[in-house]
Amino acid sequence: MLTLVMDTIENYACAHTSNESAVLRELFKESIVKFKMPNMSVGHSEGSFLKFLIQISKAKRILEIGTFTGYSALAMAEVLPDDGEIITLDINEKTTDIARLYWAKSPHEKKIKLILGNALETLKTIKGPFDMIFIDADKTNYTNYWDACISKVKSGGFIVADNVLWKGRVLNPKDEDSFALDAFNKHVLSDNRVDVVMLTIRDGLTLAYKK
């Protein structure tokens, strides 16, 4: 499997990025120990990038699709203003129990609202506008999430999608997730409501600006 960023380079980049909070550091370590899937958590460098986007854009209302153990939600909550809000959607009680545990250790917990259930069904009940939407859930539904979310992000806001390079497998798709992500990437690029840049941060990150 192709590794997009060597561990040594990733570690060097993280070492030269502003420190993550102690709670985030502990949460990432526990995610590795309990679930052995560290790539499902955005981690230090990508979490810091998401925080930058919020700080630069002065975002106050965030929607996240895919919580996992709650690293990205907490990272973003840390830089939201006191009246800011992040709504995060997931279907997995086991992983989100870890999220709740660590959010409770942070003074920013009050900014986070978790909704458990099928995200596509939940999205029908959630009203925009949002300043930023972060998509990081099951890959086969990425295009469905995009179509459900694009009207919910404000003009001048962002949609961010993780794992869009899928360890390079989008170059020659052979499995369902790879085909889905390649189709999603083409779908986003063809959407004239947004300007798009795909970044090679970790496993690939698409940043779409709503016109």
Image (cartoon, grey):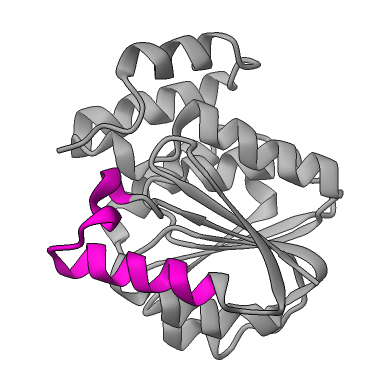
Location of residue 171 with respect to 45 vertically, above or below: below
**Quadrant of the rendered image containing residue 141:** bottom left
Q: Position of residue 120 (x, y in %)?
A: 43, 83
Q: Nearer the viewer, residue 83 or 13?
A: 13
Q: Is residue 174 visible?
A: yes
Please give the name of the residue rendered at 33% of the width and 33% of the height, measured from the top-left corner: 4
Q: Is residue 175 magenta?
A: yes
Count of numbered circles in the view = 0
Please give the name of the residue rendered at 38% of the width and 45% of the height, measured from the top-left corner: 69
Please give the name of the residue rendered at 61% of the width and 16% of the height, measured from the top-left corner: 17
Question: Which quadrant is the C terminus positioned in?
Answer: bottom right
Q: Is residue 70 magenta?
A: no
Q: Is residue 91 visible?
A: no
Q: Nearer the viewer, residue 179 or 29?
A: 179
Location of residue 137 with respect to 9 vertically, above or below: below
Q: Position of residue 49 (x, y in %)?
A: 63, 36
Q: Is residue 100 left or right of residue 173?
A: right
Q: Which residues are magenta?
A: 166-188
**Quadrant of the rendered image containing residue 67:** bottom left
Q: Nearer the viewer, residue 36 or 146?
A: 146
Q: Position of residue 77 (x, y in %)?
A: 67, 44
